Image (cartoon, grey):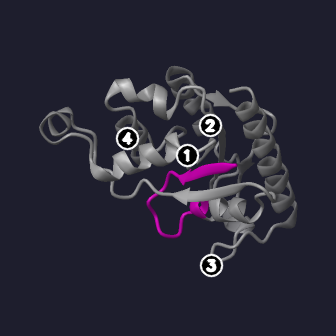
Amino acid sequence: MNIIGIAGSLRSGSFNSALLRAAVEECPAGSTLEIESIRGIPLYDGDVEAAQGIPARAAELKDRIASADGLLLVTPEYNNSIPGAFKNAIDWLTRPPADIGRVFKNRPVGLIGASPGAYGTVQAQSAWLPVFRTLGMRPWFGQLMYVGNAAKVFDASGKLVDEAMRTRLRNYVRGFTEFVAAEATQK
């Protein structure tokens, strides 16, 4: 079973990228969690799409997601909502609209996130739900994973050092991979 994981931050020291790397470490045997990036996807512009088509990086990422069994989004929270760069990438991945079914329809999706703030990414994760519904995705709600006070959870190199949080992450990844496997058997 193969899951694609995408962190929605472009910052090199991103807590969300660190959380995704920690999730890879916690992936159970028989499953893989491959890290992908939104880096290189330009701002959406319908004129660019009409003149040049889908940017190569967006097309590559669409194909990677379409061939995976599941998708794990690791979202930052900017101003109590979805980061613009992350939403922009998803918008490119829905172009042309005829590809939405191939890339997103019935795709199992997990959602986690880390923030320096005390409440983690509660608002951003809620803001993603209408997007998932619009794209026809199948979100997993078996466990919530909001990492607050991320500077205390990760060390300066981005390693997850909080063992209680590691246990929560391990349980999340295990539950999500079980959900993805169950969804795959229903196809």
Disc 2: which residue: 125
**Answer yes or no: do the residues labelled 2 and 1 have beta carbons within 8 Å?**
yes
Q: Amino acid at mark 3?
A: Ser
Cα separation between marks 2 and 1: 8 Å
Q: Foreground mark, 3 or 1? A: 3
Q: Residue at x 77, y 50 (%)?
A: 173
Going from N to C along the chain, the mark reached first, 4 or 2, is: 4
**Answer yes or no: do the residues labelled 1 and 4 have beta carbons within 8 Å?**
no
**Answer yes or no: do the residues labelled 2 and 3 have beta carbons within 8 Å?**
no
Q: Nearer the viewer, residue 64 or 152?
A: 64
Task: Check disc 2: other Cα within 10 Å, few if <14, some if 14-19, many if 20+.
Answer: many
Q: Residue at x 69, y 75 (%)?
A: 155
Task: Check disc 3: other Cα within 10 Å, few if <14, some if 14-19, many if 20+.
Answer: few
Q: Nearer the viewer, residue 36 or 91?
A: 36
Identify the secondary structure beneath mark 2: helix
Disc 1: which residue: 77
Cα separation between marks 2 and 3: 26 Å
Q: Amino acid at mark 2?
A: Gln
Q: Foreground mark, 1 or 4? A: 4
Disc 3: which residue: 157
Identify the secondary structure beneath mark 4: helix
Disc 4: which residue: 88
The residue segment tinted magenta is 1-17
Residue 140 visible, this angle: no
Cα separation between marks 1 and 4: 14 Å
